[in-house]
Amino acid sequence: GWIQLYCADNQETVDTTIQAFRITERTEVPVMVCVDGFVLTHTLEPIDLPTQEEVDRFLPPYHFSRALDSRHPLSLGTCVDPLFFTEARHSQHQALLRAVEEIMAADQDYAAIVGRSCGGLLSVAGPPEADVAILALGSVCSTMQEAMQIFPQERAVKLIKLRSYRPFPMTALREVMRGVRELVVLERAIAPGSGGIVGMEVRSLATSMDYPPRIHNYAVGLGGRDVPIEIYPRLIETITRVVKPAWFEIFDVELEKLKAPGGGPVREDRHDDHR
């Protein structure tokens, strides 16, 4: 039941963390600022910190009416019995739906004060009229954006950067998907036995569209594995030639690793790419 905002780089992480305080204050729903492990947590990157004056303008003093105070003791109930559980979940669901407006407003106000936007719920890079799109969240967005500049394609391609996973921006995403014929959903997660967690959301949304795109769902960079920019032209070439889109596929599976003596996980210090 938490708000989940995904960051493409460390600059977005700083800015989103500051925005998260205001979003939580306005919605009374906690915010998860989601950062890709290894890729961003183990990377040095120059960032621009807002001044204290800018942060104070964006985050004025806040008083939570139900804050715990020893001078006015309260009992905090953490268990909801069946008599009220349905209503509690309804309230939680409505709060997340209302958070859509607060996330957009927080980003707009932050941009007006600091001069940087994180994209609100989502953002689009590339030709808006492109009929091929890549949808991703987190650091994969930065990789794909760089790859699009290095490997220009004959067919126009745009990148949909999904920032808010919860609440899921159905209206905004449906709008940017309009006119897209081929949609690649890239994600660094998998629900074993089912498929991609973002891909399932997108497919559900596509059922409400008059002309939904073909959806190709791939997992990349699982567990913090590097996602090279060279994967981009391979993806575009793959979706162009396939007759039936991949319902879900893990890209770049190296099965030979499992066939080696004692196949399976190995000590981290035996991986050359970790040295």
Image: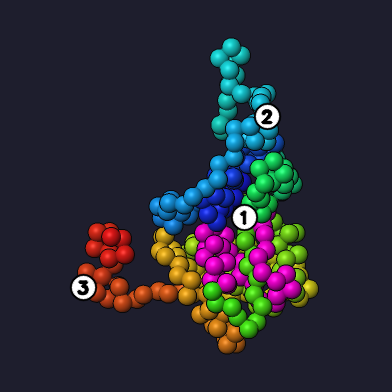
Check whether the beta carbons of the residues at disc 2 and disc 3 lie within 8 A of each other.
no
First of labels 2, 3 by sequence position? 2
Tag 3: residue type? Pro
First of labels 1, 2 by sequence position? 2
Q: Which residues are magenta?
A: 121-149
Q: Is residue 186 visible?
A: no
**In the drawing, what numbered circle is on residue 261?**
3
Residue at label 2?
A: 60
Position of the C terminus by quadrant: bottom left
Residue at label 1?
A: 163
Tag 1: residue type? Arg
Q: Residue at x 57, y 50 (%)?
A: 12
Q: Position of residue 14 (x, y in %)?
A: 55, 44
Instruction: State the CA–CA distance, disc 1 to disc 2.
Output: 25 Å
Instruction: State the CA–CA distance, disc 2 to disc 3.
Output: 60 Å
Q: Is residue 241 within the magenta segment? A: no
Instruction: State the CA–CA distance, disc 1 to disc 3.
Output: 42 Å
Residue 15 quadrant: top right
Q: Position of residue 30 (x, y in %)?
A: 60, 39
Secondary element at image label 3:
loop
| Residue neighbourhood size for the residue with mark 1, other residues' Cα within 10 Å, grouped as few (<14), some (14–19), many (≥20) | many
